[in-house]
Image (spheres, grey):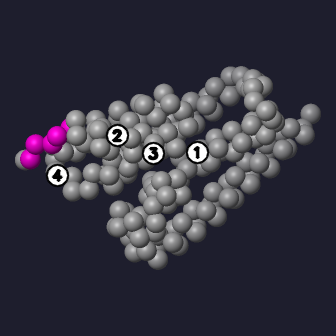
Amino acid sequence: MTTVDWPDIVRTHGPLVWKTAYRLLGNTEDANDCYQETFVAAVRQTRRKVIANWPAFLIHTATRRAIDQIRSKACHRRRQEALAEAPPVDRSGYDPARQAADRETIERLRDALGDLPEQHAVVFTLRYICGWNDQQVAEHVGLKTGNVRVLLHRVRNRLRDRLAAAEQASLKARVAP
């Protein structure tokens, strides 16, 4: 088995891993946890096989770890919401109403990504959050480019429907006495 130069791997690919985690999680502490979990998983994986494409492997692993955190947080948040009536409103910033609406939308998107099958969430994340093109995504996940496009179309529709339903539920909750 070949020796892995971990300081070089972390120095070279660490920023990419951290940005991927932060884009998905939107929180420095969570991104740091995901960053560490990604490299721990990488160490374990190198004990089993040689990694040929470090950036792709690390981004994929970071994405999976971030989605796991999103799912875990969503479950925890549901439990907390059952105990509390309503979370406090953040009053900082220029337009508090817009800021709150944007945060709610981002949280809904994160929750929706967490509910997707893993491959769907990975494909969506690589394409729209990491900025990979369809061909790169296809090569990474082992699908044909056309299949990636179809999958992305279905995921976008599913996320759009889920976000619209969540928005409707939110509006009904605001209007209800």
Mark 3 or 4 closer to N-term? 3
**Viewer-closest of 174 and 61:** 61
What secondary structure prevails in the magenta region?
loop
Q: Do tag 1 and tag 4 residues touch (Cβ < 8 Å)?
A: no
Left or right, residue 44 beside residue 65:
left
Packing grade of label 4 (10 A; few <14, some 14-19, many >=20) is: few
Q: Which residue is mark 1?
A: 110
Q: CA distance from mark 1 to mark 4?
A: 32 Å
Tag in front: 3 or 1: 3
Image: magenta residue range: 2-6
Question: Which amino acid type is shown beneath numbered disc 2?
Answer: Gly
Q: CA distance from mark 3 to mark 4?
A: 23 Å
Residue 145 in view, yes or no:
yes
Q: Give the label on residue 14, or none.
A: 2
Q: Relative to 134, is 5 above or below? A: above
Question: Which amino acid type is shown beneath numbered disc 3?
Answer: Thr
Q: Which residue is mark 3?
A: 20
Question: Which amino acid type is shown beneath numbered disc 4?
Answer: Val
